[in-house]
Image: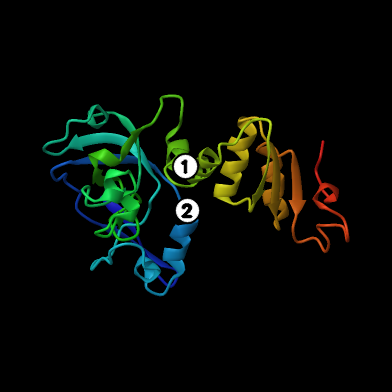
Amino acid sequence: MKAVYFLGNRKLEVRDVPDPTPGPGDVIIEIKASGMCGSDLKYYRAADGAASIGLGKKSDKPIIAGHEPCGVVVEAGKGVRSPLARIGTRVMNHHYAGCGCCHQCRGGWTQMCDDGSTTFGANGDGAHAKFMRVPADSIIALPADLSFKAGAAISCGTGTAWGGLDRLGLRGNETIAIFGQGPVGLSGTQLAAAMGARVIALDIDEGRLQRAKEFGASEIIDCSASSPLRPNEGLHERRISGSS
């Protein structure tokens, strides 16, 4: 199969590599969509690629990029009994692996594994390839009414935004200000608006602010303006653009 490697210093390579095979407890996903995250750009630009970020265990070999995987299960390894691992199942992937035994892993926080986590696309082979090997317990069902592209976004950026809103316990009668309207911020804007909340979106980029408006923001604020806050006036007097 062909796979994309981020080498650092803004260099990448497409290489021909063997298809992965599942070990015990693993599944193979045929990748249908693989997203690009801001973290991926860090790996792409950094001098030593993902190794320079210091995320989890350091790999001693080049790593296939991509940590927003979505696709279809095509093979399962020994000992896999999850119904999600049936051949043909549409799945997303929570892109971390840990020891599975420590307090963090057993609590669902494999990225905080006491033994050091594997982050696919950083120090473990990721999703910028035709196939990807992942632990069976890291796959999540992709509903039939969601596209593979949507599933790839949910696997990291949109899922991150949802996690934050869920922890906040956001209610539909509340107002939330979301600073930054990149992929995660826009996801937060879209989700919070769908939940019925009043969303104030803030950024310095006019294009992102307009997209936030399209995604459901009630008001937008350009933080690059010379005076986002009127002098000597409180938050309730903040100059807001784009109101309808």
**Label whose residue precedes the other's in the sequence (1 or 2):** 2
The disc labelled 1 sits on which kind of residue?
Answer: Gly
Q: Which residue is mark 2?
A: 37
- Location of the C terminus by quadrant is top right
Q: Is residue 11 above or below residue 200?
A: below
Kindly identify which residue carries mark 1: 159
Label 2 sits on a secondary structure element that is loop
Q: Is residue 216 above or below residue 59?
A: above
Residue type indicated by callout 2: Cys
**Nearest-to-viewer mark from 1 and 2:** 1
In the shown orientation, is residue 64 left or right of residue 230? Answer: left
Residue drawn at x 83%, y 61% is 227
Q: Please tell me which residue lies in front, 30 or 203.
A: 203
Q: Position of residue 125 (x, y in %)?
A: 28, 55
Quarter of the view holding residue 9: bottom left
Q: Is residue 72 visible?
A: yes
